[in-house]
Amino acid sequence: MNVNVAALVAVFAFAVLMLTIFGTLYRGAVRSHQRGELDFEGIRILRWGMLGQVAIYAILAVTAFLAWP
Amino acid sequence: MQPGPSTLPAEASALTAPPSTLPPYTWALLRWSFAIGVIPPIVLVAALALKSKFLLIFIHVITGGTWTGFDLFMGVVMSRVMRSLEIPARVEVAKRLTPTTFFMMPSFAATAVTAGIFLAILDGKFDLTSPWIIAALVVVVILTAQGFGIFMPNGVRIFIELAKLTPDTGLIARLNMRNISLAGVQALLQVLIILIMAHLALD
């Protein structure tokens, strides 16, 4: 299998960056929920939002294994 | 007034589970955004798996064009429309615009850039000493930093605010306006990258 290492590293770096930003916002949302300011629906939508973004980047990461020519 | 027996279960459930503050259409718009957003990376995977340069050019052009067109529309048209609206109306637009674009726009942007890099490699133009390639990469890095650092966090903050029991509508309107104004900046950078692409195509 022809692996494009640079592409794989780039996708991984983006995933880490995205998860760090999402994680920071998620922690803030959880604290708001614990204080009773935020509905649980807000936490649920953040989880699904994060999962959806990860799914899209996981599909893009597959391209690193399809290096061509 | 004494509550009738038929109202008791509803009141009891309201005490245990407060009603969601998120508008009912949020999930439907988010699902639609994901359904559209997942298509470009799948087509890119198919183009590479099938070794189809035609499909690779197609997905690069359609995602890049849609991304640029959307940002131009947001920056040139929607920013003016939004400024003319009252704050409650801006919030209503933000409530619908944020979930609809949440998956679509990052997907179009990421696919356009990834497909562009594969295309440049395929055409033997991905030379990191070339000033045109360096210029393209600089613009892409700025666009990506804005996307990850401002657009996406603002979108998430709008979701958080919408789900609050007492949403700050002023904050929602401000965050949405910031995203729309930034879309104008992104559009200018994308016009710049298209100029660079046009030069690379003639090279």
Image: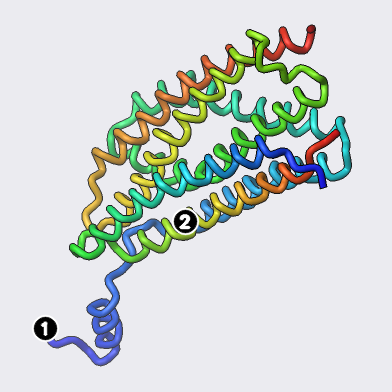
What residue sits 34% from the left and 49% below the top?
A: A25
Name the one closer to the observer, A40 or B85.
A40
Q: Is residue B177 left or right of residue B4?
A: right
Disc 1: which chain?
B
The picture places residue B35, in percent across and down from the top left corner, at 64, 52
What residue sits 34% from the left and 24% below the top?
A: B83
Which of the image's four quarters has the C terminus of chain B? top right
Name the one closer to the observer, B138 or B169.
B138
Amino acid at the residue labelled 1: Met
Dot 2 or dot 1: first in sequence order is: 1
The picture places residue A45, in percent across and down from the top left corner, at 43, 59
Q: Are marks 2 and 1 on the same chain?
A: yes
Q: How would you rate the neighbour count of disc 1 (Cα within 10 Å): few for under 14, some for 14-19, many for 20 or more?
A: few
Amino acid at the residue labelled 2: Tyr
The picture places residue A42, in percent across and down from the top left corner, at 35, 59
Q: Is residue B76 above or below residue A69?
A: above
Q: How would you rate the neighbour count of disc 2 (Cα within 10 Å): few for under 14, some for 14-19, many for 20 or more?
A: few
The picture places residue B62, in percent across and down from the top left corner, at 72, 30
Q: Which residue is mark 2?
A: B25
Q: Is residue B53 above or below residue B188?
A: below
Which of the image's four quarters has the N terminus of chain B? bottom left
Q: Count the marks: how many? A: 2
Q: Is residue B78 left or right of residue A33?
A: right
Colour scheme of this structure image? rainbow
Disc 2: which chain?
B
Tags 2 and 1 in contact by the CB under 8 Å rule?
A: no
- Label 2 secondary element: loop
Q: Which residue is mark 1?
A: B1
* Residue projecting furthest to the left: B1
